Image (cartoon, helix red, strand yellow):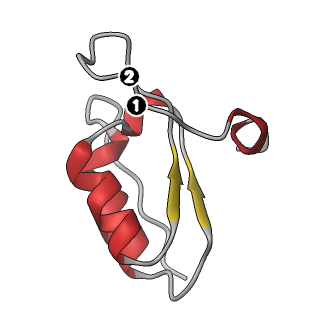
Amino acid sequence: MVLKVTAGTVSDITMAEDLLAEVDTCRHILADKGYDCDALRTVIRNKGATPVIPGRRCRKRKIRFDKHRYKFR
């Protein structure tokens, strides 16, 4: 496993797809609101997993997620 770190001023979501590329199989991907992005949700679903990521407040359409699983992130 290769450790990937972003600079302090760079959002971690920029590395999310690269990190997910290293995952073979999983059922759920848990992340905080900083990873709320439709494109990332699509990548997660294409891997056969369910995104457990709450939506940001500024979203026009409310995001449903498993709040119980989210506690384990």
Instruction: Tell which of 25 and 20 is nearer to you.
Output: 25
Quarter occupied by the N terminus: bottom right
Residue placed at 41% from the left, 54% from the top? Answer: 5
Amino acid at dot 2: Lys
Task: Determine whether, in the image, residue 44 is placed left or right of residue 9.
Answer: right
Quarter occupied by the C terminus: top right
In this figure, which residue is indicated by the disc labeled 2? 62
Please provide percent x and percent y for residue 32: 53, 34
In this figure, which residue is indicated by the disc labeled 1? 34
Q: Are marks 2 and 1 in contact (CB under 8 Å)?
A: no
Residue placed at 62% from the left, 71% from the top? Answer: 27
Please provide percent x and percent y for residue 53: 50, 40
Q: Earlier in the sequence, mark 2 or mark 1?
A: 1
Residue 28, compared with residue 8, is above or below; it is: below
Number of residues whose C-alpha sits closer than 10 Å to that of mark 1, classed few (under 14), some (14–19) or many (20 or more): few
Number of residues whose C-alpha sits closer than 10 Å to that of mark 2, classed few (under 14), some (14–19) or many (20 or more): few
Q: Where is residue 35, by image quadrant?
A: top left
Residue placed at 34% from the left, 53% from the top? Answer: 41
Please provide percent x and percent y for residue 16: 35, 57
Q: State the SS at label 1.
A: helix
Residue 35, compared with residue 15, is above or below; it is: above
Q: State the SS at label 2.
A: loop
Task: Determine whether, in the image, residue 63 is placed left or right of residue 11.
Answer: right
Residue 65, compared with residue 18, is above or below; it is: above
Amino acid at dot 1: Gly
Instruction: Tell which of 69 and 12 is nearer to you.
Output: 69
Instruction: Tell which of 34 and 48 is nearer to you.
Output: 48
Task: Determine whether, in the image, residue 45 is placed left or right of residue 58.
Answer: right
Q: Where is residue 58, by image quadrant?
A: top left
Please provide percent x and percent y for residue 30: 59, 50
